[in-house]
Image (cartoon, helix red, strand yellow):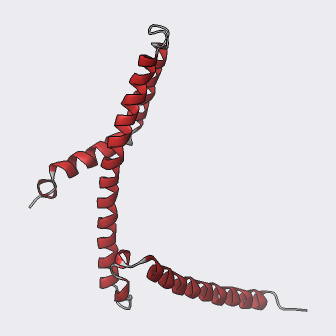
Amino acid sequence: MSTMASRSRFARFASGTARAAGRPVTFVIAVAVIGIWAASGPLFGYSDTWQLVINTATTIITFLMVFLIQNTQNRDAEAMHIKLDELIRAVKGAQNSLLDLEELEDEELDRIRSRYEDLARQARSRLERLEGAKRGKEHPKR
């Protein structure tokens, strides 16, 4: 089954819209629209309606884009979790207990993060001692 065929219409639409929204040409178009709107101010006497048009348009676009981009980010994050879970599962010696960490409560994640931070500090300390010992051998005291 094709990946594109298996994705919902909304998922394809959200992904395509998020991709398009992030392109430089989209930014240039948005700046041009704002420029045209600003330039039309004198034509409309900078009226309340003139201001309301841009406020309403940007609010609606922003509101809808939040949901589209969030959908895309959620799917991307989920795919990344699955890929990382597969790497953890496949690597010999890896901690399978780290699979699906995103499902744990914050307190449990903090406890596990603290454990790995301790391991990292210990590893850096060993590295510094090794580097210090190497420097000592390279430059013997006189």
Q: Residue at x 45, y 79 (%)?
A: 109
Is residue 19 among what the camera can see? no
Residue 43 versus residue 10 in the image, above or below = above
- 88 vs 47: above or below: below
Number of numbered callouts drawn: 0
Q: Which residue does the image show at 21% across and 52% down from the upper left?
A: 11
Q: Is residue 54 above or below residue 76?
A: above
Left or right: 141 as drawn, with respect to 135: right
Residue 77 seen in render: yes
**On-image quarter of the C terminus:** bottom right
Give x and y (percent) for residue 6. Answer: 12, 58
Residue 40: give x, y in percent of width and height: 45, 13
Which picture quadrant has residue 105?
Answer: bottom left
Within the image, what quadrant is residue 24 found in?
top left
**In which quadrant is the N terminus drawn?**
bottom left
- Looking at the image, the residue that sits furthest to the left is 1
Taking the spot 16% from the left edge, 58% from the top edge, the residue there is 3
Closer-to-camera residue (100/135):
100
- Relative placement, left or right, of 115 versus 81 is right
Residue 39 location, x and y as percent? 48, 14
Which one is in front, 17 or 46?
A: 46
Query: Percent position (x, y) of residue 49?
Result: 41, 18
